[in-house]
C-alpha cells in the first residue's frame, strides 16, 4: 500500500484521489475508521515510538456527532479513532492534516468566533448557541443570519426550519455577499473563480489561516462584500468536498503528489 485514505468509500474526493494515483501506478486504499485502526501496530521500545506500517495518509473522517445515538457504537468508534490519533501523531510519513497531541482536527472549532481567536484574528462575526430554534432577530441591513443544527450539521438561512433537533448555532455574516472558495495545500492556494479579487490577497491569507490552525489541507470560504472591497471568513473546512475542489482539481492533484511522495524521496 502506497497511500491510505481514512474515510468512506462513498467520498467522491477520496475516490478521485484513488483514481488519479492509480493511473500513476500507486496503490491507494480507502478504509473506514474501524478498519484502519486494525491495520497498525504502535510500539514504544526504549522510549522510542514506532508505527508499522508507516505510510502516507489522508485523514478524511469528521469528529463524532455531539449527540450519542448508540453508546456501544460510539464507544467503539471513539476507541478506534483514538488509536488512529496516536498512530498519525507518531507517524514519520507525509500526511495531510496531521493530528497534534492536543487536537485531532487542527484548531478548528464548532464556533466560528473561537476558530478565529485560535488563528490570532479579531472575530468579525456574532454567534448564538441555543437549544431552540429562534424565529426572529433584530434587523440590521448589513447582516444576514444563518443557523446550523449541531446534531446533523444541516445549515440554512435563519428562520427556516431544520429537520434535526439541535442544539443550534446561529451566526451573522455580510448581507448580500458573494462567496469565493480558496483551496489550500501546504504553501499553495487556488481561487475557484476568475473574479478580479487580487487586491484582497485571499490566497496568502488562506494559507496563513490554515497554518495557524495546524492544517496543511483545507478550504477557506470567504464572503465578499457586494462592492468587492472587503472579505470576511465565512467558513473553514478541513474536509473539503469534491464540489469545493473540482474547479482546481488538476493543480491540486499534482500538488498532492508532491506533498505525499516527492518530499519524502
Image (tube, helix red, strand yellow):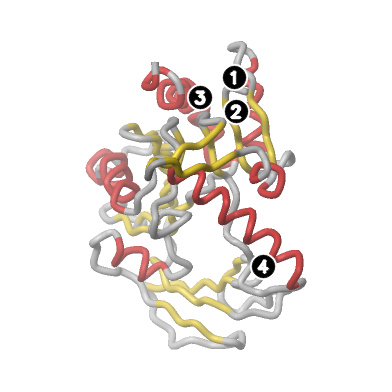
Q: What distance separates the C-alpha of mark 2 from that of mark 1? A: 6 Å
Q: What distance separates the C-alpha of mark 4 from that of mark 2? A: 27 Å
Instruction: Identify the residue at horizontal 48%, vertical 74% (top origin).
Output: 145
Q: Decide if residue 218 is in sight here.
A: no
Instruction: Identify the residue at horizontal 42%, vertical 73% (top origin).
Output: 172
Q: Mark 3 points at which residue?
A: 253
**Between residues 90 and 20, which one lies in front from this camera angle?**
90
Image position, residue 99 (x, y; %): 44, 49
Image position, residue 253 (x, y; %): 50, 24
Q: Which SS class for mark 2?
A: helix
Q: Name the quadrant containing residue 10.
A: top right
Q: Name the residue under label 4.
A: 152
C-beta proximity under 8 Å, tags 2 and 3: yes
Total marks shown come to 4
Q: What distance separates the C-alpha of mark 3 from that of mark 4? A: 30 Å
Mark 1: few/some/many CA within 10 Å (<14, 14-19, 20+): some
Q: Which SS class for mark 4?
A: loop
Image position, residue 64 (x, y; %): 62, 63
Q: Which of marks 3 and 4 is nearer the N terminus?
A: 4
* Direction from residue 101 to residue 63 in the image, left or right: right
C-beta proximity under 8 Å, tags 4 and 2: no
> Looking at the image, is 89 positioned above or below residue 127?
above
C-beta proximity under 8 Å, tags 2 and 1: yes
Q: What distance separates the C-alpha of mark 1 from that of mark 4? A: 33 Å
Q: Which of marks 2 and 3 is nearer the N terminus?
A: 2
Q: Residue 17 carries which label?
A: 2
Q: Which mark is residue 21?
A: 1
Amino acid at each position: 500500500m502506497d497511500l491510505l485514505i481514512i474515510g468512506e468509500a462513498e467520498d467522491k474526493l477520496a475516490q478521485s484521489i484513488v483514481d488519479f494515483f492509480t493511473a500513476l501506478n500507486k496503490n491507494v486504499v480507502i478504509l473506514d475508521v474501524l478498519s484502519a485502526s486494525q491495520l497498525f501496530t504502535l510500539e514504544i521500545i526504549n522510549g522510542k515510538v514506532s508505527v508499522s506500517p508507516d505510510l502516507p495518509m489522508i485523514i478524511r473522517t469528521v469528529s463524532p456527532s455531539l449527540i450519542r445515538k448508540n453508546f456501544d457504537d460510539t464507544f467503539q468508534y471513539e476507541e478506534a479513532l483514538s488509536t488512529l490519533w496516536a498512530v498519525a501523531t507518531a507517524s514519520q510519513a507525509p500526511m495531510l492534516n496531521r493530528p497534534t497531541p492536543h487536537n485531532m482536527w487542527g484548531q478548528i472549532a464548532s464556533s466560528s468566533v473561537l476558530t478565529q481567536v485560535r488563528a490570532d484574528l479579531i472575530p468579525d462575526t456574532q454567534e448564538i448557541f441555543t437549544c431552540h430554534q429562534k424565529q426572529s432577530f433584530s434587523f440590521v441591513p448589513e447582516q444576514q443570519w444563518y443557523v446550523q443544527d449541531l446534531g446533523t450539521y444541516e445549515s440554512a438561512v435563519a428562520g427556516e426550519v431544520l429537520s434535526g433537533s439541535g442544539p443550534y448555532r446561529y451566526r451573522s455574516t455580510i448581507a448580500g455577499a458573494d462567496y469565493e472558495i480558496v483551496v489550500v495545500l501546504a504553501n499553495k492556494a487556488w481561487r475557484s473563480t476568475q473574479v478580479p479579487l487580487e487586491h484582497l490577497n485571499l490566497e496568502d491569507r488562506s494559507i496563513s489561516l490554515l497554518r495557524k490552525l495546524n492544517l496543511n489541507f483545507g478550504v477557506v470560504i470567504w464572503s465578499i462584500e457586494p462592492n468587492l472591497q472587503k472579505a470576511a471568513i465565512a467558513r473553514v473546512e478541513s474536509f473539503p468536498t469534491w464540489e469545493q475542489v473540482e474547479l482546481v482539481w488538476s493543480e491540486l492533484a499534482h500538488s498532492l503528489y508532491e506533498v505525499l511522495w516527492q518530499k519524502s524521496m
